[in-house]
Amino acid sequence: MTTQSADREPRAASEPSDAQPITPAGTTSPVRKHRRRLPFVIRRNSRSHVGLIGVGVVVGLAMVLWGGGFGQFNQGQLTRVMIYAIAIAGLNIATGYTGLVSVGHSAFFGLGAYTTGILVVRHGWSPEATIPVAFVVCFVVGLVVGLPALRIRGLYLAMVTLAFGVAFPEVIARFSDLTGGAQGLTIRRAMLRPPSWSGFSLSEKGQWLYWLCVVVLILVLIVVHNVVRSRYGLAMMAARDNEIAASASGVNLAVVKTSAFGLSGALTGVGGSLFAMYLGSLVANDSFTLLNAIALLTGLVIGGEATRFGPIIGAIAVVYIPYYTSDLGQGQAAAVLFGAALIIIVFIAPEGLTGAFFRVFRRVLTVIPVLRKPQPPAD
Amino acid sequence: MDIFFDRLFSGLTAGSLYTLIALSLVVVFRSSKTINFAQGEFALFCCFIAWWLTTKGLPIIVALIPAMLVGFLLGVVTERTLIRPVRRRSETAVLIVGLGLFTGLNGLDGWIWGPANKQFPEMLPSGDSDYFLVGGARLHYDSIGIFLIMLLVVGLLSLLFNKTSLGLRMRAVATNAESASLSGVKVGTVLSMSWGISAAISALAGILLVPVLPPNELDLSSFFSILIFASAAALFGGLDSVKGAVVGGLGLGVAESMLNGYATFLGGSLQLTVALVIIVLVLVFKPTGLFGARRVERV
Amino acid sequence: MTGPGTHGPSIRPGGATRPETTALLEIRDLHAGYGAANVLQGIDLTVARGEVVVVLGANGAGKTTLMRAIAGLIPHTGEILVDGAGVGRSRPDLMLGRGIGLVPQGRGTLTDMTVRDNLRVGAVTRKDKAGVAEDIEKWCGVFPRLAKRREQVAGTLSGGEQQMLAIARAMMSRPRLLLCDEVSLGLAPIVVQELFGVLAGVNSDSGTALLLVEQNAELALEVAARVYLLEVGSVAATGPAEEFRTNDAIRRAYLGY
């Protein structure tokens, strides 16, 4: 998002003035040498780098296993965290990496949820089989909603997405035959029976959903990671940072922006699909309102836009802040805290918590890529 | 025919209210080149202030004044402390601050006054017998009042812009802020005043609007859809045009009322979707709206 | 800040002549730029009351940055003294209050407003309504082409007319020093002649000092008394315009003609 790109620009601009005449290593002053001790520098894919990643994976696995043993309520909370992390990771594609601020992602979340709800309730599908359908439906709708992004930018695009988010419950109410309208759509408990191959019984459906969310979240994170590191991801970020330059460098803005919005909506829709299984009853006016959309955006901003793990941190905030403050301020404290958090983050840490953490972390430890000889382009 | 007039009158009433909120969006946009996403929540906050004062025994017509003053201060303080520091950094930063205000103010209202809906007194006469008959349709006094108040606000704004020194400075900043500053215009003051005036208009609009538009009571989500309607109206007319806000607001109000009445195949209750379509169409095909001067930033 | 060795005897490298009495504008060691890019690297410059001074230099030498820094549009470090007293924060309205106005590069026309309103905006710092109305008439007299278009929206004016309007608008605040950034840019020679005639008149009639930035060195040297030559953010040479006009070596080295 441009909050960061604005932050980035001066840094780029400062490079020429920082670029001191290159001094041979022997002539650096003692003071400089002392400062050079930090950060520790390791090479990407070196043994220590792989080792560190390994430690991270083990810690992550341990936490997931630990959560697997939680009681029903706490495990449910963790499931919610993962569902929101998936939804926010989706939002991150459009807003964080491509710079298309969406204030209407609650609609994709809701669309995914209703896709699952309708297929399960009206057509007797098994819940987990609806996830790919939710992905596809939301991808297509995302492409359509992303179309205006070809002509509209920034504030105005946000306005469009805002209207989309506000209009969503109205559309759900309009098609009440399918969606249950204002009464909502209830997925009966028996319909959410875990598949027989999973080995979970109906009474263990919380466990089943927890592990399903773990798997889907990992898949989503891998997808995001690979998309962002691909040429396509570079094109997204180029479109975010400087459209004209990106376009001049051969980035097809139309394709990049619409497909980024499509993928973004699709991933958030997957989150919505899982949310339907988690909640078991869907009421558009409760779960998929503008405030929900702002909660997703808040999670993203708090966690850190355009960061890999920001969505998880953001999801933890989005789930646990309302939980721990529900006794305060007639249940409204969370909204106030979210609002304050958004403003404070913009003022003091535009890169979000994850971004701020890694900024500090890089002062201690930096990973640098292995230098390779330039090779002739493969194609 | 009387049904047609009925629909026309109710459309004009809603349209006048959309116009007022659209005007407040226009006043902010002219100075700061931004859409204040929290505009509706400014109005909501002021409505709560007014409602709270009426529970203390004040008549609503008296409570209106402190509510508008609070709105004015809210606007000034917001611009000075939250918007101006991030304005130069990026449009997105302003947007996020606006959304922070949106959810923060909404939550604050609920925190202070509770999330339950409130009965809100009507300022204008609204009894069952307070109407004229025009072509067989009832034209209620409060509809007339709302329409006249809208015209009064438009008139006062025109006077402000065209006949006063502040208006001259506001127009100069709207056209080219740097040039204005080189001529000695204190741009910061103009921005703060614009936000203040805008929020005061929103407060007035809110107090007129809550008892008239569904759900006819003070609800925490009252202004979500109003903001969309007003934005559609303002964009349609051109975000920097007072005239555009009037045409857009009234047009949208009447169109919505007619669509609901006559286009029954839509099944009713798709007003927001219609507003969304209007917003998209205007932004894609005519970003300056009907009367706007400035080009909306496009690729 | 060392000038190349080609300059004539009376042109001192860098450093400005310091008049005995306090100058209208005195700048000491001015640094300014955009973000981390420091464009001006320690400028010293003075303008006496009623004096006409021109700043020459190639593209990117920092001329516009210098003007914007003096006018208070961008922050600076170093000292800017007006009548010997330092100005604190840089803000255009404060500088205007001290009697320094800028005709910006690109004219800064208030395109949606009428010519008359443009001129009224130029006078927002003034309280004397009658005087303002008088001055509007005066400037419409100076530029008859503006008089005809008084109620016309300024965005519809030609480039030359917009430049006239820009000068008139800046003069509406009755500055003691008028900074002009490239008034000749993109205009027909005949219009440029007219504008410079008006500027010379402004100087001789009301004693308004002028600090001109110009690409058109030949023309600028005709009206100016003194010259500063900027090279990559510092003063490369300074001296009387006479020297720059007549000394062939300097002309070839600095001005390229």
Image (spheres, coloured by chain):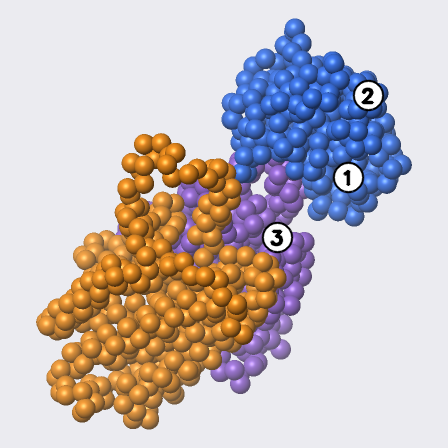
Camera-near label (1 vs 3) is 1
- Residue C185's tag is 1
Please identify which colour was used for chain B in the image. purple
Q: Where, quadrant-wise, is the N terminus of chain C in this rendering?
A: top right
Please identify which colour was used for chain C in the image. blue
Up-down relation of residue A323 to residue A273 (above or below): above
Let me know if residue B177 appears in the view.
yes
Same subunit, tags 2 and 3: no
Label 3 marks which chain's residue? B
Give the residue number, with chain letter if any, for mark 3. Answer: B240
Amino acid at pointer 2: Asn
Give the residue number, with chain letter if any, for mark 2. Answer: C247
Residue B107 x %, y %: 32, 55
Please identify which colour was used for chain A in the image. orange
Q: Are marks 2 and 1 in contact (CB under 8 Å)?
A: no
Q: Are marks 2 and 3 in contact (CB under 8 Å)?
A: no
Real-space CA distance between mark 2 and mark 3, rounded to the nearest whole angstrom: 56 Å
Q: Please tell me how crowded label 1 is: few (under 14), some (14-19), or many (20+) other residues with Cα within 10 Å.
A: some
Q: Please tell me how crowded label 2 is: few (under 14), some (14-19), or many (20+) other residues with Cα within 10 Å.
A: few
Real-space CA distance between mark 1 and mark 3, rounded to the nearest whole angstrom: 31 Å
